[in-house]
Amino acid sequence: MNPEQAEKLCREAIMFMMGSDGREKSPEETVRLFSSVAEAGYPSGMFGLAEVLMVGFGTPKDSERAINLYEKAAETGHVESNFRLGMIHTGDYGFPENPEASYRHFKTAADAGMTPAYAYVAQYNFHGYGTDVNFENAFEFFLKSAEAGDPVSMFMAGYMLETGTGTEKNEEKAYGLFLKSAEIGIPEAIMKVAELTYTGQIPGGFEKAFEWFVKGAEAGITGAKVSVGTLYYEGKGVKKDFGRAYDYYSQASEEGDSDASFMKAKMELQGMGTESDPAKAIATMTKASEQGNEEAKQLLNELRKAQNTQFIEIDEGS
């Protein structure tokens, strides 16, 4: 069997696995073809056979044998096998965690140009997982991953450029990466762009900041809901609307945000965006206080003192 024949058989095995290109799905034929290529010593066959052994497709599941095949293929430099071993050794797939081995295999795959490995190598260098902390290496691979289209890496490379971590500080380039990441929908990037737009570091003014905060709120970010509520409350970037402000504060309050609970209580006390209800306001203010809001604790004490004084005055006049 020559290399061309080996690759042809592996392609056929995949066709039988998927039931594509005129082949009926056949787990048995998939295993037979991958086995023949693996027995001939080709890493592509070892990898294919390992893949079906991992899930028990057409053959009894045998993860130990699969890992042995991945390792044998990886020793030849087979990129996909190195990447798979990197994943296996993370400890996230039911196998023992081995950070050093995980990093070694991801690095081999990344150095061979496998783009999904870039982000792993970057994260490991950034956090010192399986290797020493190395911000320069982390930035190099985050940037490579970002350029390959990974939105999380765009955000991380942007953060490192903004702060000058592992690279020279370049806020303009950082903001460009934050924008790309936000446009794809990464929540952290959406909030970052919203805040930068609000403070004027990214063009667009309050109106554009409001749009970004709304996107963050729609993505379920509690802090974004608080910000949307505040923009409606203050009439910045959008027409003032106490009712909508109250709705957003209420959502964020239910999600545990103490500032939202405080503002919700104030609006309930003053009848802004909702009916005035002192009893409800005190209950919400109590919630804000328990969530850690210092202003709520202070105001709650003042309200309780006022209540006690009123009761005393009523008792004295009776």
Image (cartoon, rainbow, N blue to C red):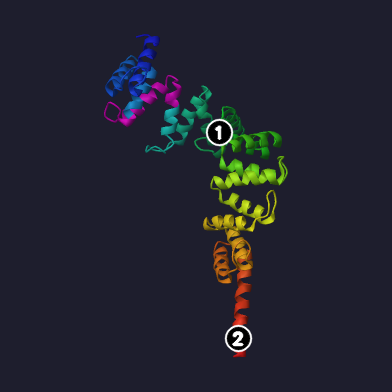
Query: Residue at position x 39%, y 14% from top?
Result: 7
Viewer-proximal residue, 154 or 314?
Answer: 314
Q: Position of residue 202 (x, y in %)?
A: 70, 40
Mark 1 or 2: the one toward you? 2
Query: Residue at position x 50%, y 29% from top?
Result: 117
* Residue range highlighted in magenta: 54-82
Q: Earlier in the sequence, mark 1 or mark 2?
A: 1
State how far apart marks 1 and 2 are (Cα): 69 Å
Q: Position of residue 45 (x, y in %)?
A: 36, 19
Q: Position of residue 68 (x, y in %)?
A: 35, 26
The three-letter code of the residue at mark 1 reads Ala
Q: Is residue 196 magenta?
A: no
Viewer-proximal residue, 187 or 313?
Answer: 313
In the picture, which quadrant includes the C terminus?
bottom right
Viewer-proximal residue, 42 or 59?
Answer: 59
Q: Which residue is mark 1?
A: 122
Badge 1, how many Cα within 10 Å: few under 14, some, many 20+? many
Indicate which disc residue 314 carries: 2
Place residue 191 in its image quadrant: top right
Query: Residue at position x 63%, y 39% from top?
Result: 159
Q: Position of residue 92 (x, y in %)?
A: 42, 38
Badge 2, how many Cα within 10 Å: few under 14, some, many 20+? few
Left or right, residue 154 beside residue 197: left
Q: Secondary structure at mark 1?
A: helix
